[in-house]
Amino acid sequence: MRHAVIMAGGSGTRLWPLSRMERPKQLLDVVTGDDGVTRSLLFEAWSRLRAVLPAERIWVCTGIRYADQVRAALPDLCPDRLVLEPVARDTANAVGLTAALVADVDADAALAVVSADQVIRPVERFAEALRIAFEAVEARPRSLVTLGIAPTSPATGFGYVRRGGPTELPGVAEVAAFREKPDRATAEAYLASGEYLWNSGMFVWRARTVLEALAQHLPASAEGLARIVAAPAGAQREAALAEVFPTLPRISVDYAVLEPAATEPGRVLVVDLDVSWVDVGSWPALTHTLDDDGAGNAVRGMSVVLDGSGNVVLCDDPGHLVALVGVRDSVVVHTADVTMVCPVTDAERVKQLLAAVEAEHGARFS
């Protein structure tokens, strides 16, 4: 059967100070839907998958510290579909753990892996691309399928997928190579060639296939995950998870599985996902989910901007007003205990700023 997992374990440090260690970005109500209601990125991801799958075949993988918040955000999530990492060990182990648990209840499962920090419109196109990817895995059981986003700009903040030749499957091509985040000139060349897609970080494969790939390319993780799932479900498995999982090598699924597998002809496939896609990884990216004040500023909360444009202004304190005069192209974020200001061009440095705050003040504002 077809299953899917939402990866929801990130800490969202580049959206500090709104995103905090105890309440990361995927749990914040930052996305306004067509109905005017603001919801979390996690709920958005859940709703997209519900257009494709029943609730009992949707899993969520997150850190154990977020368990109660995830349950509250997703009341329809089945209790035994919540996968809790005792510590963060990057995506290869999070994906592998989920795949092992899914395979334990459904040996022939096909598993889609999606992210909890993306805004995708329209949902119908996403659902169709996911259907094509599932069909590709069912036709080629050993394949690893990635979803590639049609690029709209020479973005330097994303990895890229280079299309290879077509396959016998409609809408599916082979992957020639994965490329890391390029510099501007390289990104412009990628865009001009028409051969490259943005790497969405979303995948579809058989649960058993990705476990076999881990055994081939990352045997230490594969062996540890097998030990965890060999324990009976319940207290014994939880004990094995707590003991073994922190010892697994920390590495992304891209590095551990997809890039080495892409050297095997026809092993890795790509499905084009032609949608409006926002990877909410920084303050400028969040502008697509905020309100336009009519003067070119993306805002939320109480704010007044006089003679200013190109700003991202967010006030998370309902009793506080943020007022700007003559300010342009800046990010201004106010919470109950932190006010953060930076040029839009330096928004990627917020993670660095948080590290400096922690060095001077400890974890108080993390």
Image (tube, rainbow, N blue to C red):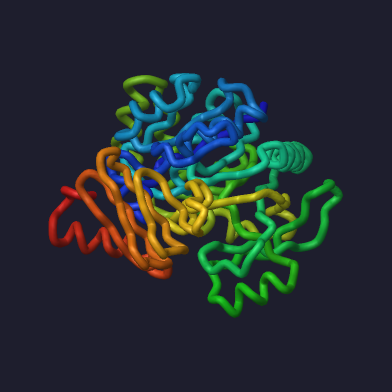
Give left or right: position of 64 versus 117.
left
Q: Position of residue 270 (x, y in %)?
A: 71, 53
The residue at the point 75 percent across, 68 percent down is: 194
Nearest the camera: 31 or 301? 301
Q: Position of residue 235 (x, y in %)?
A: 32, 21
Kindly tell me whether residue 117 is visible in this rendering.
yes
Q: Is residue 290 above or below residue 51?
A: below
Tell me where residue 302 sits by quadrant. Answer: top left
Tell me where residue 301 sits by quadrant. Answer: top left
Kindly tell me whether residue 247 is visible in this rendering.
no
Identity of the residue furthest to the front in this view: 306
Q: Is residue 248 above or below residue 193?
A: above
Quarter of the image containing the N terminus?
A: top right
Count of number-bearing discs: 0
The residue at the point 59 percent across, 35 percent down is: 34
Give left or right: position of 248 versus 136.
left
Q: Position of residue 198 (x, y in %)?
A: 62, 59
Tell me where residue 132 sits by quadrant. Answer: top right
Nearest the camera: 271 or 235? 271
Q: Position of residue 140 (x, y in %)?
A: 75, 43
The residue at the point 69 percent across, 65 percent down is: 196
Give left or right: position of 69 versus 57.
left
Identity of the residue furthest to the left in this view: 361
Nearest the camera: 250 or 147? 147
Nearest the camera: 71 or 226? 71
Q: Is residue 112 above or below residue 164?
A: above
Give left or right: position of 71 versus 322.
right
The residue at the point 34 percent across, 34 percent down is: 66
